[in-house]
Amino acid sequence: MKKLSVFVVVAGALLVALSLGAAPAPWYQWQSLATGRYMCSANDPGEGWKRHSGPYRNGACRDD
């Protein structure tokens, strides 16, 4: 009985681990509120920037 319980727990954990797929973070084009310049980043650059466009799949912020 104990072996069956361990098997069920291990099998369940394996199914959960296999079902979780890691995906890259989306990229966005950000515009500086101070200068109006643009940059591409997967992370929020902070205060002074607003999200201009996106999401994109690459660091060039293009739909390639």
Image (cartoon, helix red, strand yellow):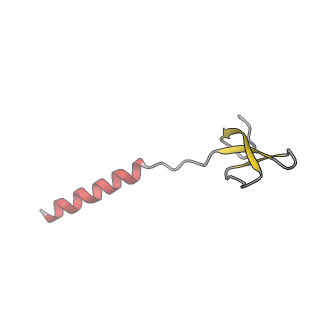
Q: Is residue 60 left or right of residue 3?
A: right
Seen from the viewer's position, the closer of residues 4 and 56 is: 56
Quarter placement of the C terminus: top right
The residue drawn where x is 40% and y is 47% is 19
**Could you tell me residue 53's position as x and y percent?**
72, 38
The residue drawn where x is 28% and y is 55% is 11
The quarter of the picture where residue 31 lies is: top right
**Could you tell me residue 58's position as x and y percent?**
69, 44
Q: Is residue 16 left or right of residue 41?
A: left
Q: Looking at the image, which residue sits at the far left?
A: 1
Q: Is residue 22 left or right of residue 45?
A: left
The residue drawn where x is 85% and y is 46% is 37
**Could you tell me residue 55's position as x and y percent?**
65, 39
Q: Looking at the image, which residue sits at the far right?
A: 35
The residue drawn where x is 76% and y is 49% is 49
**Could you tell me residue 29's position as x and y percent?**
74, 43
Q: Is residue 11 left or right of residue 4?
A: right
So how many labels did they put on this image?
A: 0
The quarter of the picture where residue 61 lies is: top right
Quarter placement of the N terminus: bottom left
Q: Looking at the image, which residue sits at the far bottom?
A: 2
Position of residue 30 relative to residue 17, above or below, is above
Q: Looking at the image, which residue sits at the far top?
A: 63
